[in-house]
Amino acid sequence: MFNKYKQWGGALALSLMAASAQVGASEADAAKLGNELTPMGAIMGAEGDIPAWNGGLTQAPAGHKKGDKPTNPFADDKPKFVITAANYKDYADKLSDGQKAMFEKYPETFRMPVYETRRTAAYPQHIYDATKQNATQTKLVAGGNGLENYVEGAPFPVPENGLEAIWNHIVRYRGGSVRRVVGQVTPQVNGDYTVVRFQDEFTFRNKLSDFNPEEDQNVLFYFKQDVLSPARLAGNVLLVHETLDQVKEPRKAWVYNAGQRRVRRAPQVAYDGPGTASDGMRTADNFDMYNGAPDRYDWKLIGKQEMYIPYNSYKLKSGDLSYDDIVKAGHINQDLTRYELHRVWKVEATLQDGKRHIYAKRVFYIDEDTWQASVIDHYDGRGELWRVAEAHSLMYYDYLVPWYALEVLYDLNSGRYLALGLDNEEEGAYEFGFERSQRDYTPAALRRSGRR
């Protein structure tokens, strides 16, 4: 399967040392963008059961109002078939080891309804333009732990190694700026849960109202997270300045503690530090499926394969659902999910000798159309499969932003899981394109916002 797509991977399986010397794609490969390849580097034409990309989903369905929760444009679609514990081995070559383990762990309830493949991914033209420019100009810094000559878009639309592929995920376009209110749950084995509600803000540096290209050149984006509930956590605020090269200049993070009414630095918000209010169910770098500095792992690009991944997950964003409809014992309500056959890049990350992390290995499956990680299998220090992450993606067609409806991280040992992104019971939808200035993301501003 991998050999079929090797021509698009270039020099696959390069080591970390070799990756450091990579200086972008050739002019010939860059010329394929928008022709043989989509503007983001995916295969353009139809192959087998995967249709051609025709520009993606750029129009809202009839009756949808901009700013409302996403209306499902495929509400009339029916599953082509359903993968269950009884038949999953028939589809084993298109499933991750973690997905297979979920069928074994929950044989009576875990299922994957498979629908028609719809290549809905679309981005604004300025992202396509930037990506084409990046193809020959952006390069990895020494060691591969940062980018040079990069502002926005996919830095490596024709990746030559695992580091380039993972950087495409880390820096992918999420609307420039976005504000959202979402819930996170960590259900007990019996399904009991408490919702932790966050108000998140992401603002990429070049979208600041007072953007100065000469200042903070190593900052990728600013992130602020206010805890809204429950009462015991409400008022705590996290502020992050995400850097492009986190080895040269580590991520800057601060926390406002409502109980102490003070701001302090938060160096633990990185790598395998505990995720906010996650009850030990995720690490800091599990957020957004994977984030942060890649320097503790060796990255190997295995190649492309066809795989059943969560896609066009509009049901999970429906305002007609309650959280109880989605959150179930063991895993989310799989009857509300939608899986499709897509091509993914497979990348293996192996912990380097002498480095520390609770995950000794991760196996990534990254959607070729969006560069979003769709499935990640996590292994412990004994080499045993431990956690399985699935990202239920959708296209925010109002704003030309592919992103997630819900991120879910399953713990195969404890029988528990974490789900982040619930907003069915919240008012309104994601707010893209709101304005923030640099002064809104300072520790002083954090202190002021925490005291309101």
Image (tube, rainbow, N blue to C red):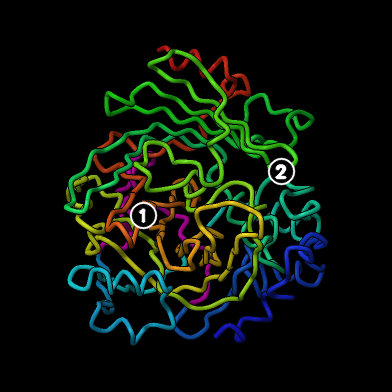
In the rendered image, is residue 376 in sight?
no
Quadrant where the C terminus sits is top left
Q: Majority secondary structure of the magenta segment?
A: loop
Q: Residue at x 65, y 64 (%)?
A: 299
- Badge 1 crowding class, 10 Å Cα cut-off, few under 14, some 14 to 19, many 20 or more, is many
Q: Nearer the viewer, residue 193 or 407?
A: 193
Q: Which residue is mark 2?
A: 247
Q: Residue at x 24, y 60 (%)?
A: 336
What kind of residue is marked 1? Val
SS for tag 2? loop
What kind of residue is marked 2? Val
Q: Indicate the position of residue 258 as horizontal and vertical percent values.
A: 40, 17
Q: Residue at x 47, y 61 (%)?
A: 380
Q: Which residue is mark 1?
A: 408
Which image quadrant for residue 85? bottom left
Quadrant where the N terminus sits is bottom right
Which image quadrant for residue 207? top right
Q: Nearer the viewer, residue 430 or 232?
A: 232
Dots 2 and 1: beta carbons under 8 Å? no
- Residue 62 magenta-highlighted: yes
Q: Earlier in the sequence, mark 2 or mark 1?
A: 2
In the rendered image, is residue 386 in sight?
yes
C-alpha gap between disc 2 and disc 1: 28 Å
**Left or right of 46 on screen, residue 31:** right
Residue range highlighted in magenta: 51-75
Which image quadrant for residue 233? top left
**Left or right of 219 on screen, residue 102:** left
